[in-house]
Every structure is written in structure tokens, then in C-alpha cells.
Amino acid sequence: PDATPKERENILCKEHGAVFFMGIGGEKADGELRHDGRAPDYDDWTTKRSDGGTGLNGDILVWNPILQQSFELSSMGIRVNPEVLETQLELTGCNDRKEYMWHQMLLKGILPQTIGGGIGQSRLCQFMLRCAHIGEVQHGFYHPEEVIVLKKHNIRLLGLGELCEDPLAANLHPGITIKDT
């Protein structure tokens, strides 16, 4: 009971290997909101459930032995409807978002109620291949200072022209010549 929500995630994932948490993002027992900074305009984390809990969303988390912490593979749930969007924007002090086109369309009932989620392919690859950083399995842009720190820890990011330095990667693509830039 003395652990933070993130610490409890870590404890449970380490003990069980994989867990499913329901109602991520709503008000916690101590009255604080949003255990992990959930957006107010995505999943419904305020609707009361029949089991007494709150929120119509959930996450699949696993224990990541490389990072030594819980690791989210999937976030899913029923998306906000107009009433829930109003409530969650108010709770988080984000009422200014009502001016955005998507928010206006949802609030006017133009957009349908939806359910979403799925397994994050890059995160699954990162977990299965035991990579420490998402950039090892998907191309992205990273701040140059972050790249320097990651290189010091032998973390090789895709898209940085490092393929030519890696004999294994070069062997995976025979006949392709990669120029240094």
C-alpha cells in the first residue's frame, strides 16, 4: 500500500510476468488523477463499471528483464464519447482542447463511438528481441545528446547510418552498399 502506482506495476509484473490493469488513468484512492498521465481525450477512464471500478480501458504489461521494470505492450479501451470527453477535459484542466477540430466534431456527435487498442508491434519487437530502446527496432528522430548517451551504452538506433558499421546487419542485406554520410 505504500508503493506508488508505478512501483505497484513493477512489483506485480515482476511477480507474475504479465498482467492486465483495468481503469488506468482515473482518480486513485488518494484522490489524485491519472496514474500515468493519461490523455483526457483518448480512452474513457472515468465511467463507473459494474464491478465498482472506474474506467473502460486497460493495459497489458509484462516484466522487462532488460529494463528491469514493467513494460506496456498494449493499451486498449472504449474511446471517449462527448459526455466523457467533457468530464475528462474538465478534470485535467484541458478545456482549451474543445477548440480543436477533432474535439469539436466529437462533441457535436459527428464522430462515432469507438473501441481501440492492439499490440504495439514495435514495443513487442523491442520486448521479444530484448532491446533496451524502441529506436533499436523502429526508425525515429532522437535528440543528438540522447544519441550520444545511447551509443555509450552500445545501443544502436536505426536510421543513423550505422548499418555500414555493423557486419551482422550488413550481412542481412547482401549486395546493398551503404554510404557513410
Image (cartoon, rainbow, N blue to C red):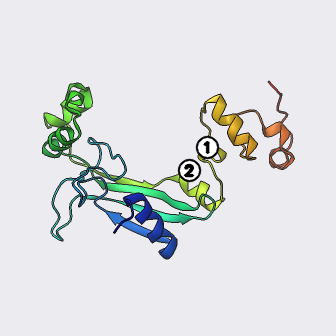
Work out which residue is located at the far bottom of the displayed protein and give it.
16
Work out which residue is located at the far front of the displayed protein and give it.
2
Looking at the rendered structure, the number of numbered marks drawn on it comes to 2
Could you say which is closer to the camera, residue 89 or residue 5?
A: 5
- Return the mark for residue 122: 2
In the displayed structure, does residue 83 sit left or right of residue 77? left
Classify mark 2: residues with Cα within 10 Å, few (<14), some (14-19) or many (20+).
Answer: some
- Does the CB distance between marks 1 and 2 fall below 8 Å? yes
Label 1 sits on a secondary structure element that is loop
Residue plotted at (21% across, 47% down): 113
Residue plotted at (44% across, 62% down): 7
The kind of residue on which mark 1 rests is Gln
According to the picture, the residue beneath numbered tag 1 turns out to be 138
In the displayed structure, does residue 22 sit left or right of residue 13? left
Q: Give me the C-alpha separation between circle 1 and circle 2.
A: 6 Å
Residue 85 in sight from this viewpoint: yes
User: Residue 10 location, x and y as percent?
Assistant: 47, 64
Label 2 sits on a secondary structure element that is helix
Quarter placement of the C terminus? top right
Quarter placement of the N terminus? bottom left
Residue 158 in sight from this viewpoint: no
